[in-house]
Image (cartoon, rainbow, N blue to C red):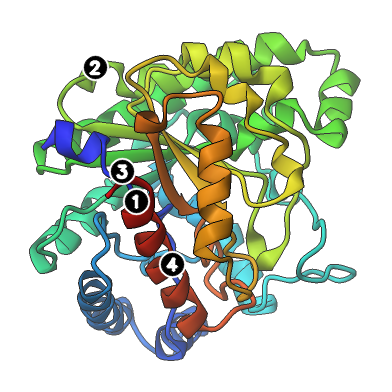
Amino acid sequence: MKKNLSHVRTDQVGSLLRPSSLISAFSSFGKGEIDERDLELEQDKAIRELVIRQEQAELEIVTDGEFRRLNWQVSFSRVKGWDLSEISWKGFIQNPSLIMEGERPLSRGADAVEFLKIPADGKLSLSENFLLKEYSFLAKVARSPGKAMLMGPDRICQMCDITGSAPFYSSAEAFLNDVVAVEQQIVGQLIEEGCPYVQLDEPSYTGYVDAETLGRIAERGEDPMANLNRAIDASNAVIEPHAGKAVFGLHICRGNRASMWHREGAYDGIAEVLFNRLEFDRLLLEYDTERAGGFEPLRFVPKGTQVVLGLVTTKQGELETVDELLRRIENASHYIDGDQLAISPQCGFASGISGNVLAEADQWRKFELINKTARRAWG
């Protein structure tokens, strides 16, 4: 299983557009109009239908679309001491579109690292493995291999108000160590359940090339390269006890809420350290716009690591062409063996429950395009 999944030529990041009935159910639950069981029944129904649709579309890897989540970040929830669930529900009920005042789709929006930052209110411990619940149901209804998606440890650390976390945590290092321990538990239980593919979502890495984020790091008197290496150590540590037991992927993007981005910068400044040190089977890299830069940094990816090029945008419905994508794959192969490449959307289609500004039909056309391109590129 591991060898096959680590080399599949198509992939997806995870979140998919929610049907309006599911969004309405979330809203009703948040307002106290239905109970948790009613919400779960609606989630179950929507996920069953979604899995059928993915398998009809011949997707090599299926997900539950993150249909049990308000946003991708609540993958790290039901954790004592630090949990974004409460602030996420409050934000959704007050502003279902997830577009804040002054923001507009297809532009740079506010960074959730800052506006969702909360302190720890206790030492971290796992109350319930939310991802295990997600995956167990997916495995029950899917014939194709499924993937579990988990917010990476550095992103969690960036979203914790460390200065407000005393007496429980006095340093980012101490908090990060406990995040890693919790995530090792989450991943271990997923693998025991038979999950063949686990993905860490780590948009935090593009913070180390983004001017605004680097400015905040400087204001705190921190060394960005030291933080980067600490982040890599944490990502690797989450999966290290489980090496060889599943396929492990790591996704890097620049933000995706409501078709906006939140960071900018090419991989060049971090690629040599990042790509050489990450110990993952698959790197899912955003590459749909000039914000990601060129493919030259791929020369630092070691042999044996598969790079999934996120060439197809999820931020709008305009469709790329097969020829355009083939040209970009060919360009990338100048810097990395073409046998190490695969293709996917640049990010999820709905990092938040309200989704990006494209139609569901556009979403499926993009997956069809990805499959066509992969067949042309690799047979």
Mark 3 vs mark 1: which is more N-terminal?
1
Q: Which residue is mark 1?
A: 10
Mark 4 vs mark 3: which is more N-terminal?
3
Amino acid carrying label 4: it is Leu
Distance, label 4 to label 2, CA atoms, is 37 Å
Mark 1 crowd level (few <14, some 14–19, many ≥20, 10 Å Cα)? many
The residue drawn where x is 53% and y is 59% is: 323
Distance, label 2 to label 1, CA atoms, is 27 Å
The x, y position of residue 228, in whole percent, is 64, 17
Amino acid carrying label 3: it is Ser
For mark 4, give the secondary structure.
Answer: helix
Left or right: 126 as drawn, with respect to 121: left
The residue drawn where x is 45% and y is 23% is: 235
The x, y position of residue 134, in whole percent, is 26, 58
Q: Which residue is mark 4?
A: 369
Mark 3 crowd level (few <14, some 14–19, many ≥20, 10 Å Cα)? few
Residue nearest the viewer, comparing 318 with 323: 323
Residue nearest the viewer, comparing 10 with 206: 10
In the picture, the disc for residue 253 is none
Q: Which residue is mark 2?
A: 241
Mark 3 vs mark 2: which is more N-terminal?
3
Residue 259 seen by the camera:
yes
The residue drawn where x is 20% and y is 31% is: 188
